[in-house]
Image (cartoon, grey):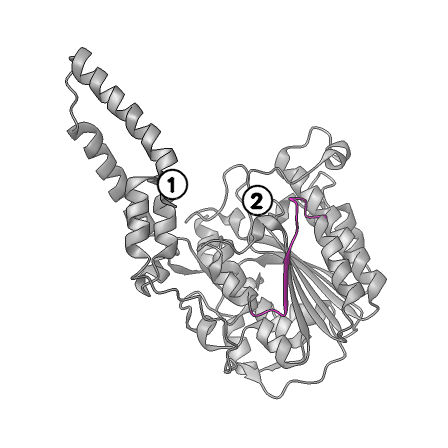
Amino acid sequence: MSGQVLIITCPALLITLTIVFIYRKFISVKFRITIPLSFYIISFCFLFILILETPIKKEIKDGDFNAMSELIRVYFPALTGNLLYVGLKPISTDIYSNFNEIEKFNEAVILPPKKTDNDLVVLIMGESSLVTRYSTYGYDKPTTPFMTEIFNQKNGCIVQNAHSTAALTRDSIPMTLSFNIPESDDNLFNNKSIIEMAKYNDYKTFWLASIQQSISSSFSTKFGFIARKSNYIEFTDNFDDISLSKLLEDRLKNDNSPKKFIFIHLRGSHKLYTSYDEIDKQALPNAEDYDLTIHHTDRVVKALYDVIKTYSDNYTLIYTSDHGEIVNIGHGFVKGIDQFLIPFMMISTKNEFNCQFIESFRATNGYLSGLMNKYILSNLLGYEIEPTILNQEKNNDRVYLSNNTVMPFLEFLEKN
């Protein structure tokens, strides 16, 4: 290791000494270190204050400084970032490091579960997908012709007025796949996740995701904590979400487990809006990049659906998104309703899982919240939910904002 370091540092040191010698010998301009140093310190303090207003504040309170140190290294590389990273690592508590099965069920879950004959449950999670850009929901460009066809079939359901719980993936997915709530992360660590509940009721569990959604940093370990409970985890070897259909086919073709729960995480429409190809451009000439990514996702969902139909005649498929998008700006902001407006579609070969089933989870305010995803999935996997708790949660419709505050959804909608 020393040899490799010297190869880099020795030439850098010689160049630096040469520059200093020239500067001291031939240049008479007086350099005031206080000006850049003051700017550096002010910038660092400003970044630190911003960090304390982001969702990773929860981790910091729990003594987990990994996400904070990684973020500082991005904006303050070299000396400051590396020193903080090295200094904080030994005293940081990795709150997502325990991958053991959790024994306790959430209090809302009625035990024992039924031995369901719903053999294949697939949840496709889109990314940064704004529902108002879907032709399925009335957009004037034909961005989603395949989804319109798929989910308009018998036992298909195109759900209106659905919204995500958060505007960041790291917060939204845990509130879909565990009993995590906006006010606290306690249930994430204390109650079985949907993955673990599926396994408990004899489902083999699969986590299939785009390579760009790999669980590789502190920013993704919150949902990675859930993902690692799966029996099988695999990521694509390229950046095209279409490749996920090949991963799905491999699992359905080669795994003979009678019951499967499969979570599929797309790259979808995440900035920089590059997830599309020539086929999308030909289908939507002169369309903006964001619409092309929606069209590409439509093709991905069609490819995944075709695989499911080929290998199963007993399935339930849900397509939704982790959050929406303020197009050409992004997501994860304190303001902006578009980052919460998402599609929700379902189709099932089981007659009991129809539109009326989904509508039973709609709040009295007229919206289907992402907080209901965990309860919908619980039912699909054979679990009943205590009605009093379900009704209480259903009609307590709120969203988690990126400044760590919780707000009733209708109040947020009225302000935005």
Horizontal and vertical percent position of residue 101:
52, 77
* Magenta region, residue range: 229-242
Q: Amino acid at mark 2?
A: His
Q: Secondary structure at mark 1?
A: helix
Q: Amino acid at mark 1?
A: Gly
Quarter residue 288 falls in: top right
Q: CA distance from mark 2 to mark 1?
A: 41 Å
Quarter residue 359 falls in: bottom right
Magenta span: helix, strand or loop, mainly? loop
Q: Residue at x 54, y 46 (%)?
A: 325
Res 2 visible: yes
Dot 2 and dot 1 residues touching (CB under 8 Å): no
Q: Secondary structure at mark 2?
A: loop
Farthest residue toward the bottom? 112
Which label sits on residue 383? none
Is 238 part of what is drawn in magenta? yes
Horizontal and vertical percent position of residue 122:
70, 65
Q: Which residue is mark 1?
A: 3
Q: Residue at x 54, y 71 (%)?
A: 394
Describe residue 280's horizontal placement relative to residue 265 as left or right.
right
Q: Decide which of tag 2 and tag 1 comes sooner along the chain.
A: 1
Q: Which residue is mark 2?
A: 270
Is 149 part of what is drawn in magenta? no
